[in-house]
Image: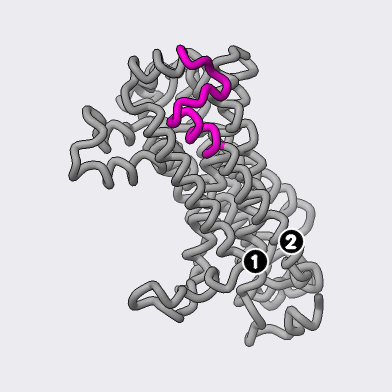
């Protein structure tokens, strides 16, 4: 089964049903409720989590109702796709009700994917590789990989996965509604426009934002008081040893991500470079480039929205210096997602199973 032929609405319905049943378990007093008092993150009371102040007695049944309702929406999308693909339904489309269901699915996708999660999934994505690299050397001391992935953080990852499923369900339904080719996804001239120009702009924006973040972290690691006084830098370093060098490591990872982003518009992003053993010269699978880009886009957008929320609630100068670069992260996420879409459109090539003209001929 190819990636395109997976029944995404059915998977989204299954995910929502499972999460709804889990929420019913929490409603009846079951353990593991990952929000409010069930989330041990010390920053909760400072507004880091949008659900940091909820109470299980109220939130759990609401979550159950919403999740089960989302399961119904996804099941309806799956059913309408099946009906639209029947020969008797050819050319009839799925009507305004289908468009409304898509809108609901997109709302669920955005809520699960970028609104509910906070910065911790992104922190885990950045810290775990650093911890793996430093583990043989015992650095950093007292920090384990497990400490970066407690249940509330894993739950946020599960929510982000659910958001991705609902986005794919909405996209799948849209293709059926427009009688798109089941092999390439094209449906008329609108899907064939040349993505080269806007994809290139998106790549430059997505690659530029992490440079701003990295510059601040490198400055602090070198003792340059950018946004802080020299005394504040020293005090924070004494209170949390290694904080600035850890930040510099994350900044370096951000710069590495910037370089990789250019692969979405460069030849080495389509074929593995010659210096890579075994894979040299082979075509880069589209999903290998698109899926990580979308995951990072979701994570940085969630973190950026959280930074904005925290600074709105408490516009402290120290927090502004620390979190200020993060205010650009929703722009980073949107640009990275757009760059990934442009890359996918460019790489899909000409379809051998539909009657669409070649992409170059229609651009």
Q: Looking at the image, can residue 108 be seen?
A: no
Disc 2 designates what residue? Answer: 94
| Above or below 130: residue 363 | below
As helix, strand or loop, the secondary structure at mark 1 comes to: helix
| Above or below 58: residue 62 | below
The number of discs equals 2
- Which stretch is magenta? 213-231
Quarter of the image that includes the C terminus: bottom right
Residue beneath the point at 26% across and 33% down? 140
Say the numbered circle drawn on residue 256.
Answer: none
Specify how the rendered protein is coloured: one colour
The reply to whether discs 1 and 2 touch (Cβ–Cβ < 8 Å) is: yes
Whether residue 228 appears in magenta in the rendering, the answer is yes
Q: In this view, does 349 lie to the left or right of 89?
A: left
Using the rendered view, name the quadrant where residue 18 is placed. Answer: top left
Q: Name which of mark 1 and mark 2 comes first in the sequence.
A: 1
Disc 1 designates what residue? Answer: 83
Whether residue 46 appears in magenta in the rendering, the answer is no
Q: How crowded is mark 2: few (under 14 residues within 10 Å), some or many (20 or more)?
A: many
Residue 262: percent from left, percent from top: 58, 60
Residue 277: percent from left, percent from top: 34, 75
Residue beneath the point at 58% across and 73% down? 267
| Above or below 14: residue 2 | below
Using the rendered view, name the quadrant where residue 303 is placed. Answer: top right
Frontmost residue, 83 versus 108: 108
Residue 7: percent from left, percent from top: 51, 63
Q: Is residue 333 left or right of residue 92?
A: left
Frontmost residue, 250 versus 166: 250
Quarter of the image that includes the N terminus: bottom left
Residue 208: percent from left, percent from top: 63, 47
Residue beneath the point at 22% across and 30% down? 141
Q: Looking at the image, can residue 251 be seen?
A: yes
């Amino acid at each position: 089964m190819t990636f395109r032929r997976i029944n995404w609405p059915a998977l989204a319905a299954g995910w929502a049903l499972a999460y709804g049943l889990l929420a019913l378990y929490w409603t009846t007093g079951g353990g593991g409720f990952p929000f409010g008092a069930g989330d041990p993150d010390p920053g909760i009371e400072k507004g880091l989590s949008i659900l940091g102040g909820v109470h299980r007695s109220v939130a759990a049944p609401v979550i159950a109702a919403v999740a089960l309702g989302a399961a119904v929406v996804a099941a309806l999308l799956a059913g309408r796709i099946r009906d639209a693909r029947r020969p008797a339904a050819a050319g009839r489309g799925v009507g305004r009700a289908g468009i409304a269901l898509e809108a609901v699915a997109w709302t669920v996708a955005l809520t699960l994917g970028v609104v509910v999660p906070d910065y911790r999934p992104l922190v885990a994505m950045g810290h775990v590789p650093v911890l793996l690299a430093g583990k043989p050397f015992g650095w950093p001391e007292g920090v384990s990989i497990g400490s970066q992935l407690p249940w509330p953080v894993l739950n946020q990852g599960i929510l982000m996965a659910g958001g991705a499923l609902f986005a794919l369900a909405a996209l799948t339904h849209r293709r059926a509604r427009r009688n798109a080719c089941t092999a390439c996804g094209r449906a008329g001239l609108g899907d064939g426009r040349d993505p080269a120009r806007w994809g290139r702009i998106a790549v430059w924006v997505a690659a530029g934002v992490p440079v701003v973040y990295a510059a601040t972290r490198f400055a602090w690691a070198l003792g340059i008081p950018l946004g802080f006084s020299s005394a504040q830098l020293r005090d924070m370093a004494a209170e949390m040893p290694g904080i600035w060098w850890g930040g510099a490591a994350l900044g370096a990872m951000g710069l590495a991500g910037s370089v990789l982003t250019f692969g979405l518009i460069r030849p080495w992003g389509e074929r593995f470079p010659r210096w890579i053993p075994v894979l040299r010269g082979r075509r880069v699978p589209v999903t290998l480039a698109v899926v990580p880009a979308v995951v990072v886009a979701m994570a940085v957008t969630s973190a950026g929205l959280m930074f904005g929320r925290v600074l709105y609630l408490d516009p402290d100068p120290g927090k502004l210096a620390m979190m200020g670069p993060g205010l650009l992260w929703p722009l980073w996420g949107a640009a990275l997602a757009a760059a990934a879409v442009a890359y996918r459109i460019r790489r899909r090539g000409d379809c051998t199973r539909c009657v669409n003209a070649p992409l170059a001929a229609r651009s």
